[in-house]
Image (cartoon, helix red, strand yellow):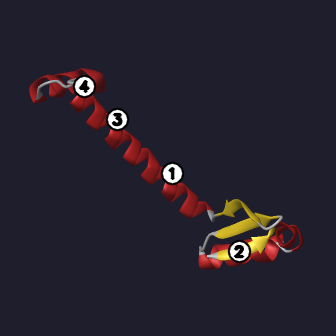
Amino acid sequence: MKVELVTNLKRKATEILGELAVDREPVLITQHGRPAAYLLDVSTFEAMNERITLLENIARGERAIEEGRVVPHEEAKQRMRRWLE
């Protein structure tokens, strides 16, 4: 992973963004020697958000099963038919 000082980001933003677009390698931005932020290309960020959303939905479904909030398959099909109409 690349590491850049926040001052370098200020001075060379166009260059750093250009490299990021090509390499798609996250850049750790440091400030006063400490991690401050990660810089990601748009497609990587969007893909990460999609994965997080999917994992959250799976976890929500698993909780529903554990809590007994389920319906039989036929009832679910009927509900979906009504919802799609």
Mark closest to the chain's N terminus, 3 or 2: 2
Q: Name the residue under label 1.
A: 49
Q: In this view, does 13 lie to the left or right of 25?
A: right
Residue 71, image x, y percentages: 16, 24
**Would you place residue 7 above or below residue 68 in this image?**
below
Residue 8: name its quadrant: bottom right
Which residue extends farthest front? Answer: 33
- Discs 3, 1 touching: Cβ within 8 Å: no
Per the model, the C-alpha gap separating discs 1 and 2 is 23 Å
Mark closest to the chain's N terminus, 2 or 4: 2
Residue kind at label 1, given as amino acid type: Asn
Mark closest to the chain's N terminus, 3 or 1: 1
Q: Name the residue under label 4.
A: 67
Q: Mark 2 points at which residue?
A: 3
Give the foreground label among 1 and 2: 2
Q: Mark 3 points at which residue?
A: 60
Query: Which secondary structure lies at badge 1?
Result: helix
Give the foreground label among 3 and 2: 2
Give the foreground label among 4 and 1: 4
